[in-house]
Image: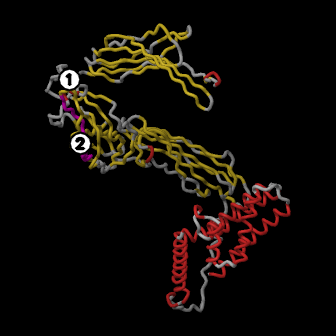
Amino acid sequence: MLLLFPVAAVAASFTVSAPRQVIKGRQFQVTYTLENAEGSNIKAADIPGAKLLFGPSESSSYSMSIINGKREQKSTVEYTYTYRAEKEGKYNIKGATINVGGKAISSQGFTIEILPPDKNADNSSNSRGSVHIDDISSQSADRDVSANDVFVRIILSKPSVYEQEATVCTIKLYTKYQISQFAPTLQPSFNGFLIEDLPIKGQINDIENVNGQNYMVAELKRCILYPQQSGKLTITSGNYDLTVVQYIQHRTMFGFMREPVDKQIKVRSNSAQVTVKPLPSPRPAGFNGAVGKFNISTELKPDKFKTNEAASYIVTISGTGNIKYVKSPDIAFPSQLDVYDPQTTINANPNGNNVSGNTKFEYTFVPQYVGDFEIPAPDFVYFDPAAGKYVTLSTKAYNLKVEKGVGSSSSASATDKKNILQKNKDILHIKTGNFALTRNVSFIVDSPAYWLWYLIPVLILASVIIVYRKQLKARSNVALMRTRRANKVAQKRLRTAKEFMKKHDSNGFFSEVLKAVWGYLSDKLNIPGSELNKENIASNLAEYGADQQLVDDIMQLLDDCEFAQYAPSQDDSRIGETYDLACDVMDRIENIKRRNK
């Protein structure tokens, strides 16, 4: 059966999996994985700071799946090498090669860092001197969790900066224990700073050596700070509730076993201070607070200008620093141009320990007069903290030759009176005189319409509630609901019977009519199906208010339908009479119900 499904071709791949960090003296494994191919003669590159203990050990697996009629096969072969870290350092390892189908394919290379062991580590599992991250025997539950085992640090990339100069603040958790729960109860505050949050890796997936001890590390927060004032600014400490995992040793019939247990602790981070130097004085004219390293460019669109037609003057400032907070330089536009406030577009992202990108200011202006005009070159001034000085950047000036466009325009040499009249032609004089104003004092609460706005919604709501409660009460009465829907169900079956009548199918016709009448009488008279017979129907019809003629007609209808199911085929006239009789008796029963209401 599997051969009936098309097989989806999957390309071969050769990948590597290796730890990023290991501790000197510890063993680690590097695994090369070959998928969807058969390989031979694998060659792995040496790791200079490690000794190969054994390998490669080979394991393979095979899987198959069928999705939407396509059969996918996947084979995997893993080659595992075991090493022991012997020399501290960071090493770049080349990829391995393997022969697949007569061709050599290579995996990617990788980087591995060998960290020094803990200073007081003796590589013995019986050591009680300190806790080690790779030795759970040292993480027993009978020892206290000290401040050197788990702590939170606030780290600054630059503890001394100028105003508006970026410094990166990183809050890290250092632990020698696994953490099962972590909850900040008081976050550090950053008063006096503008903050730009950076993405973090929340998992504990790094190892760092601090003061001769190895810790598992997780970033809690990482942000770029822009100090807004000079002096010493303090980043307050934070409080955190943690649950660490320790181990209890049990003696069992299979030997000693360790069981993990949780211990709740509280941790308080350090506080940190940033020394903020004031920007040098005097500050040059045109300086608007830009700190970093920037470039400036300008652009004018379109190339030709006409009166009453919009154009754009674009200033783009790019670089690294407080790019999101820079302001446009002052531009002395000619008075003959109607200039609108600029539209600002910021495109900036974190880059290392700072923010890089550009900020674009687009001015829209409309020439009002024919003539030659000049937009002078603006100067952009910023402070370069690396050089410790102000830098002034200049751009080019633009000469505009404005031609007459659609609509009225004026010459630049027109008199001031004419300009004023044209700019203010839409201003009209204030009307004066006696307007015969009267004071009309009336209160809306005195009008009937005011109270009707309250009364009408209340009445509507009361009506809706009454109708809704009646419907709920009626639906709770099962017998009443059966009686009400009896005629609807019967009419539906009679329509089906009529379709059989049109097809001259007498058997199907009489079967549907009989079902319609039996079901109608069961629902209308509230007789259970198990007790439904002609005697009960006759007695209940009499109690319901039917006369003897109606009872006889119903009995005759039931007899005719039952007999017709076993008799030879009936002619169409006989079928039509039966259909009319069924409709007639149901209508007469419905009329009895209306008279009894």
Q: Are marks 1 and 2 in contact (CB under 8 Å)?
A: no
Q: Nearer the viewer, mark 1 or mark 2?
A: 1
Q: Nearer the viewer, residue 399 or 142?
A: 142
Q: At which x and y percent is residue 458?
A: 51, 80
Q: Assess whether residue 366 is covered by the magenta stretch.
A: no
Q: Secondary structure at mark 1?
A: strand
Q: Nearer the viewer, residue 265 or 443?
A: 265
Q: Nearer the viewer, residue 517 or 425?
A: 517
Q: Quadrant of the N terminus?
A: top right
Task: Tell me the distance, in whole angstroms, between the alpha carbons under discs 1 and 2.
Answer: 41 Å
Residue at mark 1: 255
- The structure residue drawn at horizontal position 69% and vertical position 79%, both measured from the top left corner, is 547
- The structure residue drawn at horizontal position 14% and vertical position 26%, both measured from the top left corner, is 128
Q: At which x and y percent is residue 111?
A: 38, 20
Q: Tell me the kind of residue under disc 1.
A: Gly
Residue 321, image quadrant: top left
Tell me the number on the disc at residue 223.
none
Q: Is residue 440 left or right of residue 122?
A: right
Q: At which x and y percent is residue 177?
A: 24, 33
Q: Is residue 59 above or below residue 376?
A: above
Q: Tell me the kind of residue under disc 2.
A: Ser
Q: Is residue 381 above or below residue 254?
A: below
Magenta span of residues: 234-250
Q: Is residue 213 visible?
A: no
Residue at mark 2: 269
Q: Is residue 552 above or below residue 89?
A: below
Please name the colour scheme applied to the rendered image: secondary structure
Q: Assess whether residue 249 is covered by the magenta stretch.
A: yes
Q: Nearer the viewer, residue 597 or 7?
A: 597
User: Tag 2 or tag 1, which sits nearer the N-term?
Assistant: 1
